[in-house]
Amino acid sequence: MAEFTPSLLVVSAHAGDFVWRAGGAIAKAAMRGERATVVCLSYGERGESASKWLAGNSLEEIKAIRRDEATAAAAALGAEIEFLDMGDYPLVETPEAMTRLVDVFRRVQPTVVLTHTLADPYNGDHPAAARMALQARVLAQAIGVPNADGSVPTKDEIIGAPPVFFFEPHQPEQCDFRPNLLLDITDAFERKRAAMECLPAQTHMWEYYTQLAIRRGVQLKRNAGPNLGLPHDTMGEAYVRYYPQVTEELS
Amino acid sequence: MAEFTPSLLVVSAHAGDFVWRAGGAIAKAAMRGERATVVCLSYGERGESASKWLAGNSLEEIKAIRRDEATAAAAALGAEIEFLDMGDYPLVETPEAMTRLVDVFRRVQPTVVLTHTLADPYNGDHPAAARMALQARVLAQAIGVPNADGSVPTKDEIIGAPPVFFFEPHQPEQCDFRPNLLLDITDAFERKRAAMECLPAQTHMWEYYTQLAIRRGVQLKRNAGPNLGLPHDTMGEAYVRYYPQVTEELS
Amino acid sequence: MAEFTPSLLVVSAHAGDFVWRAGGAIAKAAMRGERATVVCLSYGERGESASKWLAGNSLEEIKAIRRDEATAAAAALGAEIEFLDMGDYPLVETPEAMTRLVDVFRRVQPTVVLTHTLADPYNGDHPAAARMALQARVLAQAIGVPNADGSVPTKDEIIGAPPVFFFEPHQPEQCDFRPNLLLDITDAFERKRAAMECLPAQTHMWEYYTQLAIRRGVQLKRNAGPNLGLPHDTMGEAYVRYYPQVTEELS
Amino acid sequence: MAEFTPSLLVVSAHAGDFVWRAGGAIAKAAMRGERATVVCLSYGERGESASKWLAGNSLEEIKAIRRDEATAAAAALGAEIEFLDMGDYPLVETPEAMTRLVDVFRRVQPTVVLTHTLADPYNGDHPAAARMALQARVLAQAIGVPNADGSVPTKDEIIGAPPVFFFEPHQPEQCDFRPNLLLDITDAFERKRAAMECLPAQTHMWEYYTQLAIRRGVQLKRNAGPNLGLPHDTMGEAYVRYYPQVTEELS
Amino acid sequence: MAEFTPSLLVVSAHAGDFVWRAGGAIAKAAMRGERATVVCLSYGERGESASKWLAGNSLEEIKAIRRDEATAAAAALGAEIEFLDMGDYPLVETPEAMTRLVDVFRRVQPTVVLTHTLADPYNGDHPAAARMALQARVLAQAIGVPNADGSVPTKDEIIGAPPVFFFEPHQPEQCDFRPNLLLDITDAFERKRAAMECLPAQTHMWEYYTQLAIRRGVQLKRNAGPNLGLPHDTMGEAYVRYYPQVTEELS
Amino acid sequence: MAEFTPSLLVVSAHAGDFVWRAGGAIAKAAMRGERATVVCLSYGERGESASKWLAGNSLEEIKAIRRDEATAAAAALGAEIEFLDMGDYPLVETPEAMTRLVDVFRRVQPTVVLTHTLADPYNGDHPAAARMALQARVLAQAIGVPNADGSVPTKDEIIGAPPVFFFEPHQPEQCDFRPNLLLDITDAFERKRAAMECLPAQTHMWEYYTQLAIRRGVQLKRNAGPNLGLPHDTMGEAYVRYYPQVTEELS
């Protein structure tokens, strides 16, 4: 295991998910000078590209467009990005896919992992991505699970036990999403907005997710109480912490 | 509202609960030089003093014994303690009791609150104490709720929105206690043990809760992962955070 | 505490509940020669006696009618019965009511307790009765809780930790009633039917609860499997066990 | 029981709740020419009037202000309103309060009931109001429960079994609010906005709840699917139906 | 997308399920002159044909018998039926199976979908069928998911967002089946009974499911209240609505 | 189906699980002279053998070591053991694996089945094993599901409906493990300890699981109450019963 260096890994089912759902957390990590990596399991080429199909694009054209957009959005946030091109609608959990994702975890050595919720009645790819991320995290910890090239991993190649956070789905209540963590993204929101604007096919979402950040900011202030002196225009993102928090101090 | 000064408030149904369930957290706060206050709603004179009744003590004698023990235990932890003597078995949620508890919240100005779980099929006083603590916390925030002397509170007298943590009940799974926070109490355990030993009627509990601290420590290390380099003999306490965590950084 | 003698206690909100919901269990206990006691917290005089109000009866007349019917039904099952006449719609949880119910527990020394579910969106008296039964059971265990006459109880007067079972409400799924125990009442069903027929205002219920016994019997056979060789006409009652089962053998 | 005439009853803990949470549903009923009645259990004088206390108003002045505002908002929606002045922070569930609320149900003869959720960790008055509304609804159905003047109710005075809907709390996920019904309030939103503007102390809420209506509208369109041809600017309110829906047709 | 024409699609794991569990809803749709289609993923040839195996029939014979019975039952209800013959015990969720089921959704253009619950500890095929139905519904909506012949679907070929209802399993409480909708099938029950009688190997089920319809009818009347004036012999079927209801009016 | 002969079947994901989690139940069955069979789906060679990989052992060496250890532990408990060698990390649910497991069920004719919980965020193999055990149990009941050699099973070859119990995972609360059964293993603990000592790579676990047995014993005594007269040093194991208990008597 490498010594402790902050490293954020975001496992995104489709090319755009990480922007709307976790753009603030990614930008904040980058602004602190930390490594942030996004891995897109698919481009969302079949399930989240209706307008491009209607415009008559081919599958490969759509994948290229989405790749370019997501690359630009990641750059706007300050993150690295890679694409596993596993296909979507449905995203299928094969052994090969798992091997590739374990390889990502071992290369990135995440100290924090973000992914989708385990339930989503509107999109089966999202829970599939979450299950894959959780399984890859556990497999990547085990020295008995070989590397992608078949070799036995060294102690530096296996990973620790990074905390996992689920980011907010489109219809949170229907996805059993009950936030137990509200992240203050006020200072990072400008970057998040810039990243959103890299996705031109979904202009109506720009305002929608700006309003969501305001809404979560209002809740953040209410939960923080007046003691923290948060400004009126606090922006937030909501998360569910999956494993127990380990801490030296209650706060 | 006063400016931010750490202040831990523990709302305990009976005189001994705070020792077994939250002694580590209290000691840690005290060891950091912070104020820690325990408020015992009752002495546990009827429901948790069987051996003293069997020995033929009177109600007042039992209350005095329990008061002395709890006072010694609080001192061992480094905490202040007060007793509201509301009676137990059952602990009843009256308007007068609520007024007194609101007064405690306003005097103590807690920045962290610890109390029982909201469910406990073995002891109805525990959920009653939790409900009272939660209600008092909300009432104490409102400038429209008068002080105990009938006066309108000043802005410094009302409280903020301190986080609330439920400490561990005796049979956690039966009380819907699913810890989402594991507190490292290794350096505070010696104080906790000393406090436990202030309760001589329950010597078999000393070892029982020592073993529980070891058990929660093992889980703490597993959830932390090897990155944190926790020592082999890590001791822990488990908690449930009730309101969403507000934070600047995912970790 | 007395030595172990089987004693079944049924805490029923209204005068008729015990018949429809637990008649089979009561009859089985009686047929084994065990003591069975029903305590009716109210007569159901306001909430479950519509036809009698429409017929112009007075409150006292209705209480007398319901008392007579319930007494006859208990006799048909082989059980003792007592009436606490606490009033219904709503059934209110006062300290006095609790003292009286603790007294029942101490006199009856139950080894098994049956009562309502903790949720019922159609009738608030049912959960109130369940809460009272659960609280009385805990208070009756404590030597520090005085008897009704103010005396300190002896070791023989306090009770043990009898298991508690919730019997089936009218709309089980709406009451979070997920049975984890199916009781074979085939040999006791004749008595249950006889007890139901002591309640003449609700003739349509006789068939309804006969059919329910068949339905639970079908499920019982399916869960038992063919090994037990249960007969085709097995009748059943469904229960939820509230505390963990303690056992010497998995079966 | 009276013959079927639509009648909407909204049970609101404080004077303003009905506007933010159910203004659309109320306005829609009124626009269909139906009777809509709001009953405010308290004025929210202690818990939701901080700015008025800070401005040095007396309790009676605050109650008068809140009464006037709520009266104006109800008028803007097209609803009747009455105030039970039970006090808030805490709202206490007394027998007298229940009798008064049963009286409201019998006078209003509701065919639909709206109220708060049964859980709200931020405000204990909201669940208290919900519990009171649910209990009053059941008591008002029973011919054995006397009228406020002590008389036995006639068949026309008792009520039926109106469906109950919980309206949306401020932090839905923390209140176990999982909407199972989305109401299209597009045509009624202008009235809702006008009603919100009758509450001048909370101008920041006007926009907040306008944005929430947009958000729920987006979800409404997604759940409706394209078949219904809903317009781009659909506005919505979210509800939880408490009892099973009874219907002649699945749709 | 086609214009709105009512079309009911029932996804049934085995050949008989649709009769017992949704026969009333199917018959009602047919009686309104609407299209109703049943798709049986398997014949239930291995898991639900014990008597035929005991009688020495071959696999192909059993499939033929079950096909004939289900065809007759569908005719009795007034529904079309098709058989995908995917095999049972276990029913396996392959990509090919999914392609075929997406094709059914696109051909049928359902406006309402019925299927099994997502949990069933007694029969793994039932949740498998539910998962397949839910996934097929989402895939069939996406223009990027090709037709079975590999072509890009037209706007008329993709489907909308039809509501989904889970029908009642054999042991509802064990399957987390908490009905939130009760359908009045009184006028359709004669057809349902006729369809049940097309399944001669399960004569004991005819009465069992007749009694269940009576039971759900009693609950339906209780939830409807007296206002609707439902007749004494109301028959019902219970369902769980999976997605939020979208409506113009609370009722 | 064979006549009723007690037969315990334990389905264990890895070679060591059955010792820590169910050793007491296995030993008790053996001490009663009953057949007890452990089936290990894998050796835990990749996921639970870190020290052996670090020591430079090959995959086959590790499998052999774990096989020997588990064989010795089973012998110490008095159980038979077989190894299906399906591979771990991940354990994959293939049709072939299922056929082999069905074969085990039909050979062993279990009257009680023990396996893992259905949730475990720390180890995906555990829920996979539980799903496989549950599915195999249902398939083995069906006469239409062929034997491993393709033959139609006889009536003696299919199995009944044995109860299933989930044994305790390492972090019970995180695995939704809420025990509803506490098994007294006092007289079997010596055997369990001997079996644990057959697993020398995990010496720190010996004490950990001894302490857990003490802890569950304390809870067992509390739930049993004083009536049963259990000794001070009662040891216990906790289980979750999955299907409803079928019984002739409430106790």
Image: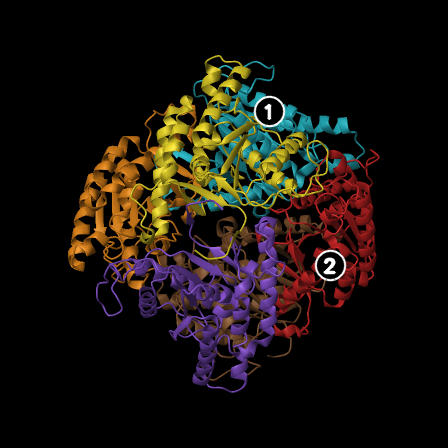
Chain colours: A cyan, B orange, C purple, D brown, E red, F yellow
Q: In this view, does C37 lie above or below F186?
A: below
Q: Residue at x 67, y 46 (%)?
A: E126
Q: Which of B234 and A198 is in front in this view?
A: B234
Q: Disc 1 residue type?
A: Leu
Q: In the visual, does A20 lie left or right of C103?
A: right
Residue C189 drawn at (x, y percent) = 54, 66
Task: Report whether residue D229 is seen.
Answer: no
Quarter occupied by residue B21: top left
Q: Which mark is residue A101?
A: 1
Label 1 to label 2: alpha-carbon separation: 53 Å
Instruction: Tell me the residue that label 2 is attached to.
Output: E203
Q: In this view, does B19 lie above or below E221?
A: above
Q: In the visual, does C95 lie left or right of F168?
A: left
Estimate how packed mark 1 is, as few (under 14), some (14 to 19) or many (20 or more) residues with alpha carbons within 10 Å. many
Q: In the visual, does C140 lie left or right of D39?
A: left
Q: In the visual, does B50 lie left or right of F191?
A: left
